[in-house]
Amino acid sequence: MIQNMLESTPSYLQTGGFFLVGVAMLMVVLGFVTYAILAERKVLGFMQLRHGPNRVGGRFGLLQTVADILKLLLKEDTIPRDADRPLFIIAPVIAFAPAFLVIAVLPLTERISFANIGVGLLYYIAISGITTIGILAGGWASNNKYALLGSMRSAAQMISYEIPLVMSVIGIVLLTGSLNLNDIIAEQQSVAFLFKQPLAFFIFLIASVAELNRTPFDLPEAESELVAGYHVEYSGFRWAFFMLAEYVYLFAMASLTTILFLGGWQAIPYLTFIPGAVWFGLKFISVVFVMIWIRATFPRLRADQLMSFGWKVLLPLALLNIFLTTIVIELFRSF
């Protein structure tokens, strides 16, 4: 048995290769975050009939986000005197690390896939839930009543909306018989699950926006009520970690939506000559644009409206979708 363990242990060269691939993926994600923030500010400006960033980096403001990041790196890193110092320092890392870990199971194209595990969907849901602990720890460790209120709101919101999020994809699992994300994409070769599971798609999209703490579900960061919420005492690079986690999750959630409901890299019939990476990119960008559009359009909900909507509307609809999917599967099986 020891011999088998030694043979299965990766060599130093393989370990170095894994590390370099991970660093390369981190650079890709950081590049996305940099220009997703710029794109969001530009789209919001366009929808609100104003100019977005147009100073740093020329007419289109291409270096505005880079300048903002450099400013954050140069800012003083303050820690409140009465804060729980070890927990205050580690909380942003706990919030960010799961956001990057979930990317490992997302098959971006037929060839670009880092970890093809049999329970990829379950892995994503399980690991992403750890971020709630980081947000709760940051609010608690700050020793600030507004930070604590924001972190408690975030924990309640993320736990509440994770339930309809998970239940919305059960219909897909029933149709494919697998939790493997590659198998789910393969099942959409003829028809995307958006057309087979439209109700599940809308539940998943709404719940994913709530999971990302984005408008209209941004109560944990409500500036008008909680002066930025759980990260009010953070500054500099530690504050940037919380923002980084949000936009890395935007990348991951948009990718997961593309995989589950839009067929991943699968091409539209008669356009199969276009590479799968292009199809994935177009679908991915569309989902990101819709999330930005939602932010520009809807006002923030009240806390009681948010919780009622999750438990009294989305959860019953998710249960109804499972019930209808089961009936359809049994009817087709009988014929």
Image (tube, rainbow, N blue to C red):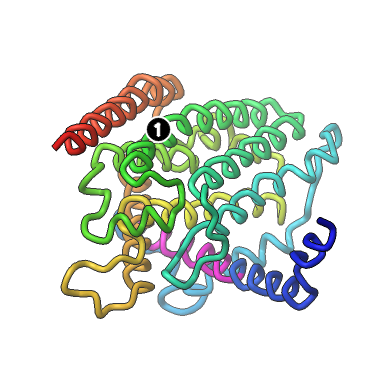
Q: Is residue 47 magenta?
A: no
Instruction: Report whether 86 appears left or right of 303.
Output: right
Which residue is rendered at x = 38% and y = 40% of the image?
169
Up/down of 75 relative to 269, above or below: above
Quarter of the figure that contains the C terminus: top left
Say what amino acid the circle numbered 1 marks: Met
Which secondary structure is most common in the magenta stretch? helix
**Residue 247 in the image, given as x and y percentages of width and height:** 52, 54
286 or 144, which is in the foreground?
Answer: 286
State left or right for residue 190 relative to residue 251: left
Q: Could you tell me if residue 50 is visible in this image?
A: no
Q: Nearer the viewer, residue 45 or 5?
A: 5
Q: Residue at x 81, y 56 (%)?
A: 1
Q: Nearer the viewer, residue 197 or 40?
A: 197
Report which quarter residue 327 is drawn in.
top left
Q: Position of residue 117 (x, y in %)?
A: 54, 55
Which span of residues is magenta-colored?
27-44
- 8 lies left or right of 197: right
> What residue sits 36% from the left and 57% below the top?
185
x and y percent of residue 328 in the render? 20, 34
Image location of residue 311, percent across then percent down? 40, 21
